[in-house]
Image (spheres, grey):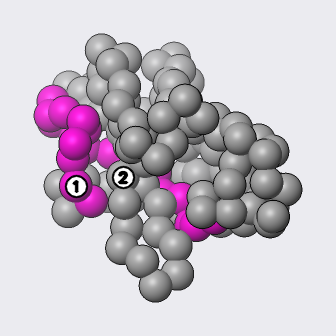
């Protein structure tokens, strides 16, 4: 079992910024566990979980249209941490944000939540107007 550890989140006024971090456990002896892509999803109350941003091992990134230009996903391969930097936050961005990983060499670009192998417990982001 691979447990992802999220941190960050909280409450912010509209227009403000927040950052989330996701620690992916390190497995130095298995190619399977070092060859993965990660993505951030979010789920607001009463709504379906949706993909927000994704980053592949080659550092290529994709974003949902609703967050393009405002959110940035990045990673630190040495620390095995994936970040989601959010700026220009809107009330519609309020949700629980989940970090997810897809192991084994696939691409996270366009991946659905059902395709992801492992998840974090979620970090709540609340944006007040």
What residue did someone put label 1 on? 112
Q: Quadrant of residue 127?
A: bottom right
Question: At which x and y percent is residue 123?
Answer: 62, 61
Q: Is residue 13 above or below residue 87?
A: below
Give whichever of discs 1 and 2 has the lower sequence position: 2
Q: Could you tell me which residue is drawn at 80 percent across and 65 percent down?
A: 128
Q: Quadrant of residue 58?
A: top left
Q: Could you tell me which residue is drawn at 25 percent across and 38 percent down?
A: 108
For residue 105, say whether it is visible.
Answer: yes
Magenta-highlighted residues:
94-113
Magenta span has 34? no
What residue did someone put label 2 on? 51
Which secondary structure lies at badge 1?
Answer: loop
Instruction: Check disc 2: other Cα within 10 Å, few if <14, some if 14-19, many if 20+.
Output: many
Magenta span has 102? yes
Which secondary structure lies at badge 2?
Answer: strand
């Amino acid at each position: 079992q691979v447990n992802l550890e999220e941190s960050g989140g909280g409450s912010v006024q509209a227009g403000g910024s927040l950052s989330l971090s996701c620690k992916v456990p390190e497995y130095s002896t298995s190619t399977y566990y070092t060859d993965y892509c990660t993505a951030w999803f979010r789920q607001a109350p009463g709504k379906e979980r949706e993909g927000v941003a994704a980053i592949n091992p080659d550092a290529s990134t994709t974003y949902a249209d609703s967050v393009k230009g405002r959110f940035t996903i990045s990673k630190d391969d040495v620390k095995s941490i994936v970040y989601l930097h959010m700026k220009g936050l809107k009330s519609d961005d309020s949700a629980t944000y989940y970090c997810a990983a897809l192991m084994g060499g696939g691409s996270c670009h366009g991946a659905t939540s059902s395709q992801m192998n492992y998840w974090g417990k979620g970090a709540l982001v609340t944006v007040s107007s």
